[in-house]
Image (tube, rainbow, N blue to C red):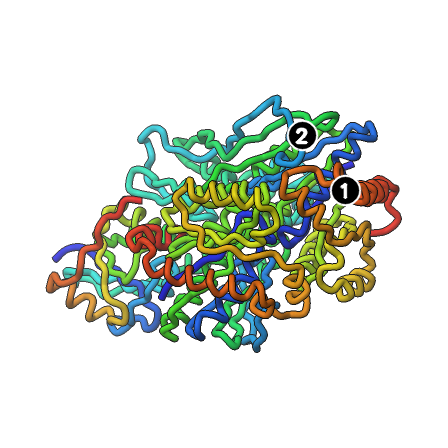
Amino acid sequence: MNGRLAVPVRDGVGLQARLDRQLGRAAAFVVVDLDGSVEPVYLINEGVQAEQGAGIGAAALLLQHGVTAVAAEHFGPKAEQALRAGGAALYTAPGGLTVAEVLERFRAGTLVRHELKVY
Amino acid sequence: MKQIVVVSGKGGTGKTSFTAAFAELAGRSVVLVDADVDAANLALLLDGSDEPPREYQAGRLARIDPVRCTGCGLCVDACRFDALHLAEPHRVVLQDLACEGCGVCAVVCPEDAVSFVPQRAGQWTVRDTAFGPLVHAELVPGAGNSGKLVALLRETSRGLAERLAASWLLIDGPPGIGCPVHAAVTGTDLLVAVTEPTPSALHDLERLLELAARFRLPAAVVLNKADLDPAGTDLVEAAVAARGVELLGRVPFDPEVPRRLAAGTGLLTVPGVRDAVVACWAAVARRAGRANASAAEEGRDAAV
Amino acid sequence: MRLVVASGKGGTGKTLVSTHLAWLAAERGLDVTYADVDVETPNGHLFLAPVVEREHRHTVLLPSLPFGHCTGCGVCHDFCQYNAILPLPDSVLIFPELCHNCGGCVRVCPPAVLSEVPHEVGTVREGRAGNLRFLDGRVDVGEPRATPLIQEVLRRIDAGTLAVVDAPPGTSCNTTAALSGADRVLLVTEPTPFGLHDLRLALQLCRTAGLPAGVVINRADLGDDRPLRAFLEAERVPVRAAWRYDPELAVAVARGELAGRRVPWFRDAVEHLLDACLAPQEDGRS
């Protein structure tokens, strides 16, 4: 399996970190290399304090790190638009899961694809 | 949990006193937000103890190093916010109030004389009131960007409401129709516009309802001081009906209301007004219950 | 002289005061402009009923990438303080609603392929109401950038004339923009805890801006004006006028009339206020 999956997290730095509800205002992201060739990367979301457009800042950060898929509880419209423009696939994951659990569901194909909404 | 935002367009129509009254009627299953961070008044009506305040920072301000600055004026011409001016002798002065921290001055400065400092923009806290927690803030006058602070308060209150399994999240909105209002109404389940029978209030209500339509938010209207001018009341009712917006109730004018507000009590202590406000809240609750769920879903968090 | 009528709290009577000051100044034969910069909710026109002579659609410049030579370097994204630009491999995605039109991205773009295009934010109207010059701004519904429109209205005030500026409520960007270039500020308040709380903030803003302020107490008998007056005395802020609630005033406002035309005592009160505003200032710069 190729590509990189990113998950917004609020506490912890590794696979046991739990999902944060917000993408743009998440404390950090865990980025997992899907073919396992690179260790999971922990990215602090510097843009969490951004005056505005935190979702876009987060999307830019993830795209810079070669992310191809993002699983989150919730996508703001701007973050969604930005990630889609960058070619990332979006999935909705239920709140409270750990990164490991999200990854497991992703590999099993049971994560729900986040549908495109027209604003 | 239903999110109700109380707005008006024109200021002074009664947003805050209605929000406080609705909070009292919401059966102690409510979280409150004062989203009018320029002029936050809900806490004046709702006693309680505040948690220690938290600092809120937003953006940055430019600083010009007077030793390096040669007064060439390149930054003065480049600044789109009119924040920089040339002063004698050969010196650039910055007006903090106008600076938006964009950084253009630093790009054009040949002397590397520009640096940036974070801007302290205000503070916020949660108050424990008799009806439920109130998330409120105070912006430093002139600090600007209140939209982000409104978004922060709303995010905090949503978390609180979920944790407490509250039925209602009541938002006291800012006046106007601009960016703080956008941040306050985005993603709510029902926008309640408080208006009065005057041409000014009606004019501003029309602009507000246009905004609600654009954000695809379900909206309804409460007519305050309804008996002040029968002809004006007819005009408001006709305008609201023409837009297909529901009029949730009419509340009479009573000079006792400002006196009670001055004494720190609210609408519900004025007998003639009380019944009308109770009826309005019942209508709000009913209307929010059947608010167009898909419309609310689509508009949710459009400002993130 | 430019006099800005502001308030902090909304609905205290800014438009009532500013339209009357401008109208009565014009009646005295002064060359006066009324400028409504409450551009989200402008109401002065409802009372002054101006004949509009010119309308101008105001634009700001927003970045645009018209031709596809973007290298995706991301320098514009790194520069933008407002997260309005997302870099993609060979283009950028621009979020115009977040842009503050500072123009920086266009300056820093290394291949210079970003350019700026005009974006309409609202309408400025110029006209006359009797002897009065009328100006107002009206931001488009849904448009977040109100301050450039406020600046544009203010730019159209002729230097050397008397201008009465009707400001937006609050103490953030829009009000700050309205205060720019002011000589004096009149803060309209009401004797409620709300009015006092917001007046404090408005006064703080005036002081930050280095502007002398006086106060008008509207509906002085509705509520309790003692805390308000004690505060003003302690802060040495002059009360320029105070008047009681009169249902006749409310009726005039409800009919969109200039209340001073039908309520003689109110006309007199504003005449005195105008005298006070035009008199050489002895205090206020506390």
Q: Chain of mark 1?
A: C
| Three-letter residue code for mark 1 | Val
Answer yes or no: are tags 1 and 2 on the same subunit.
yes
**What percent of the width, then of the height, locates residue B293?**
30, 55
**What percent of the width, then of the height, locates residue C176?**
64, 47
Q: Is residue C251 left or right of residue A41?
A: right
| Towards the viewer: A46 or A55 | A55
The mark nearer the N terminus, 1 or 2, is 2
* Residue A28, quarter of picture: bottom left
Mark 2 lies on residue: C134
Q: Is residue B187 left or right of residue C133?
A: left
Secondary structure category for the residue under label 1: loop
Is B143 drawn above or below residue C115 in the view shown? below
Q: Is residue B72 left or right of residue C214?
A: left
**What percent of the width, then of the height, locates residue B234?**
52, 43
Q: Quadrant of the C terminus of chain B?
A: bottom left
Q: Is residue B93 left or right of residue A71?
A: right
Q: Chain of mark 2?
A: C
Crowdedness near tag 2: few (<14), some (14–19) or many (≥20) residues, C-alpha within 10 Å:
many
**Residue at the image point whose x is 60% and y is 67% from the top:** B270
| Towards the viewer: B78 or B98 | B98
Mark 1 lies on residue: C263
Is B292 drawn above or below residue C75 in the view shown? below
| Three-letter residue code for mark 2 | Phe
Residue B67 in sight in this render: no
**What percent of the width, then of the height, locates residue B144?**
57, 52
Is B135 drawn above or below residue C215 in the view shown? below
Discs 1/2, front: 1
